[in-house]
Image (tube, rainbow, N blue to C red):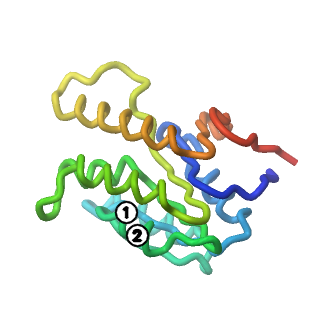
Amino acid sequence: MHVKPLVGTELILGGARSGKSRLAEQLAEQSGLIVKYVATATACDNEMAKRILSHKQQRPSQWMLIEEPYNLANIIREHSNNQTCLLIDCLTLWLNNCLFQPIGNHSWQQAKADFLHAISEAEGHIILVSNEVGQGIVPLGEVSRKFVDESGWLHQAIAKQSARVIFVTAGIPQVLKGPTLSVI
């Protein structure tokens, strides 16, 4: 796959195991910029710890790893510049952390507003990866419905200010907004 370098934010959405993270990593690698990988996952159990380790081993060793489950806005402000591609994976894990494992007095709405403001002012290239969870049935439980609602609203807000939005299904990227991807 050959892509033109993109300046600005791009959002890559897809279901579980859709190929969205692999695409994000390819785009980051092809950007020609210094890649800083921002991981939002926390090892809450053994299975997740194994997933995190597997992901670490698959990434290029020259990429800087930043593990930040909560304060993505500060990471963007600190690390975004014209020589850097920030790859943030994954926003739905970040949403889960902020909604259900909050730290301090920060509300989800405050964290979201701060994040959206940070990406609107960021320099360089930011790739955001997130799970699209709103295409199924409406969940039965209140907590699940809140998560799906907040995820959908977050994605809409990010897509509005993104240079490119891509939806990945079965490893096939579909550009919803912005420059197309061209396959060699």
User: Do residues under tags 1 and 2 come within 8 Å of each other at their CB atoms?
Assistant: yes
> Distance from label 1 to label 2 (Cα)?
5 Å
Left-right relation of 109 to 92: left
What residue sits right under mark 2 in the picture? Answer: 75
Q: Position of residue 103 (x, y in %)?
A: 16, 63
Q: Secondary structure at mark 1?
A: helix
In the picture as drawn, the residue positioned furthest to the front comes out as: 121
- Residue in view at x 88 percent, y 48 percent: 184
Asked whether 12 or 77 is in front, the reply is 77
Left-right relation of 117 to 127: left
| Amino acid on which the number 2 mark rests in the picture | Ile
| Amino acid on which the number 1 mark rests in the picture | Leu
Left-right relation of 17 to 34: left
Instruction: Give the class, few, some or many, for how many residues have Cα within 10 Å of label 1's Cα (few <14, many ≥20).
Output: many
Left-right relation of 151 to 145: right
- Residue in view at x 51 percent, y 62 percent: 122
Asked whether 30 or 162 is in front, the reply is 162
Rendered view: 173 above or below 76: above
Rendered view: 161 above or below 143: below
Q: Quadrant of residue 19?
A: top right
Q: Secondary structure at mark 2?
A: helix
Q: Position of residue 175 (x, y in %)?
A: 67, 36
- Residue in view at x 37 percent, y 63 percent: 73
- Label drawn at residue 150: none
- Residue in view at x 31 percent, y 49 percent: 95
Q: Quadrant of residue 49?
A: bottom left
What residue sits right under mark 1 in the picture? Answer: 72
Asked whether 181 or 55 is in front, the reply is 181
